[in-house]
Image (tube, helix red, strand yellow):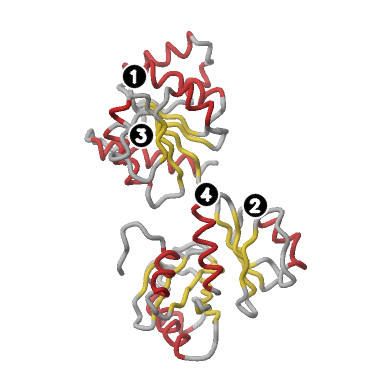
Amino acid sequence: MKIEILKEIIKKKSSKEQFAVLTNLTNGNSEIFELGNTLSKEFESYKKEIENYYNLKKSGIIEETQVFIHNYIKPVEVIIVGAVHITQYLIDFVENLNFVITIIDPRKYFTSQKRFKNVKIMNDWPKEAFKKIKTNSNTALIALTHDPKIDDPALQHALKNNFFYIGALGSKKSHVNRCLRLKEAGFGKEEIDSIHGPIGIKLGGKSAPEIALSIVAQLVSESHKL
Amino acid sequence: MQKSSKKTILEEANSWIESNQKVVIARVIQTWGSSPCPIGSKMIVNEKGDFLGSVSGGCVEANVINECIELIKNKNLFKKIEFKVSDESAWNVGLACGGELIVFIEKINS
C-alpha cells in the first residue's frame, strides 16, 4: 500500500462520509472509491460489482474476482441535549465507536470547550440548533437536561423526524409526566412509547459514568437494528 | 500490545513511517465461521515486531507478526495468508474458535 493511500484514508475518515478502499489482491494496488468517482483501469471492469458492494456497505473479496473492497461506513449521528456531567463520560465511552456527536445546550456555563474537547458544541436552544443541522432517521437523540423546556422541544423534533433512537433521562415518574406533555402536544401512543425512558439499559448503577455506560450500551444495541 | 490514547491504527502507521520505521499492514479480507475479527480488521507491524491492532483476537497474531517481519526482510510487497481449520498448520497456530480467515499483508511504501 502506498503511503499516499494511507494518508488519504486517514483524511477521508475524518470527513465522516462513506468511502471504500479497493485492493487488487494480485498486485497489491489500492485506490479510494466514492460513489460518482471514476475508477482507474485497474478496477473499471468491476464497476458494477464495486458499486453494488458499496451500496450494501459490504466489505470483502468481490465474488469470482481478486478485488477486495473495504467500506468505511459513515458514522451514526448522535445529538446530546445537555452538556452535563453524564455527557462528559458519554463522550469518553463513544470515543472508539462509530458515532459522531453534537452537543446542544443553551446554558453557556455548561458548554465551555474546556469541558468538551474535540466535540461539536452548539450553544443554542434545541429549536434553533435543529434549524442549523441536518437530521434524519439515522440520527439518535439523547436528552439529558431533565429540564422540560430544553428536552421537550428536542424530543418533539426527534419524534417528528423519526430518529432511530430517542432516549430521555429522568425517573419513572418524571417520564410519565413527560409522556403526558407529549400527548398534549399531539403525539400518539406508539410514538411516545418509542422513547427510551428512563434512558439506558438496566445495569443497576446510579453514578454518572455508570449511567453513561448504560446509555452507550443501549445506543449501540439500537444502532445494530438499523 | 500498546494502545495510544487517541490515534487510530492508520494514524499510528503513518507516524511510525515518519519516524523511519518499516511498516507492514495486515488486513482481514475474508472470514468463515466464527472468526472473531470482522473483515477489514487490521494490524500494523514494524521490523522489530512491535504491533498494534488485531486480526483474530489473539489466535493467529504471532504467526501474522512473523510473516510481516519476513515480508520486511524480503523483496515481495505483499502476501496472502490463509488460516483454515482443515489445514494442519492452522492447528499449530491455534484457531481455537473454529473459524477460518484470510489475512492480506502488505508493505506500506512510498
Which mark is in front, 3 or 4? 4
Residue in the foreground of this view, choosing between A88 and A128: A128
Secondary element under disc 4, as helix, strand or loop, is loop
Cβ atoms at labels 1 and 2 below 8 Å apart = no
Closer to the chain start, of discs 2 and 4, is 4
From the viewer's perspective, is the residue at label 1 or at label 2 nearer?
1
User: Which x, y percent locates residue A45?
Assistant: 77, 68
Q: Earlier in the sequence, mark 3 or mark 4?
A: 4
The amino acid at mark 3 is Gly
Residue A105 position (above or below residue A38): above
Name the quadrant of the C terminus of chain A.
top right
Q: Secondary structure at mark 3?
A: loop
Rendered image quadrant of residue A215: top left
The amino acid pointed to by label 2 is Leu
Direction from residue A217 to residue A129 in the image, left or right:
right
Which residue sits at x=32%, y=27%? A108
Sequence-wise, which precedes: disc 1 or disc 2?
Answer: 2
Q: Which residue is mark 2?
A: A56
Which residue is denoted by mark 1 in the rendering? A147
Image mark 2: chain: A
Circle 3 chain = A
Q: Which mark is residue A16?
A: 4
Q: Are marks 1 and 3 on the same chain?
A: yes
